[in-house]
Amino acid sequence: MRVSKIAYKPVGLALGLLGGLAAGALFKQTWKVLGHDEDAPDATDEDRSWREVLLAAALQGAIFSVVKAAVDRAGATGVRSLTGSWPG
């Protein structure tokens, strides 16, 4: 295993945690802006429609995926800048 890949492991974990927190906050704000309730529905929320539950899940998944890709890419680029090699 290359040194850059080993060096990236703790960086990737920390960035993943921060990215998850950021994605959660972004989703919550996006859900409010779209004019829905303050909290997104859970899949087992009896008072919410199928449409609303599935829309919330799709939006949340899209936001988390984009934030994760951006954070992972930025972290890998940073490690390459520091070590001279790509961590992947």
Image (tube, grey):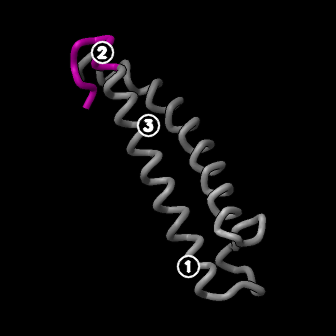
Q: In the rendered structure, which segment of residues is drawn in magenta?
A: 79-88
Q: Quadrant of residue 51?
A: bottom right
Q: Determine the residue positioned at 65% across, 77% down.
A: 43
Q: Position of residue 59 (x, y in %)?
A: 53, 66
Mark 2 sits on what residue? Answer: 81
- Secondary structure under the numbered disc 3 in the rendered image: helix
Looking at marks 1 and 2 on the same chain, the residue that comes earlier in the sequence is marked by 1
Mark 1 sits on what residue? Answer: 54
Q: Establish if 18 lies above or below 39.
A: above
Q: Is residue 41 magenta?
A: no
Mark 2: amino acid: Ser
Quadrant location, the N terminus? top left
Mark 3 sits on what residue? Answer: 71
Quadrant location, the C terminus? top left
Label 2: few (<14), some or many (≥20) within 10 Å?
few
Mark 3: amino acid: Val
- Label 3 vs label 1: CA separation? 26 Å
Q: Position of residue 44 (x, y in %)?
A: 70, 80
Looking at marks 3 and 1 on the same chain, the residue that comes earlier in the sequence is marked by 1
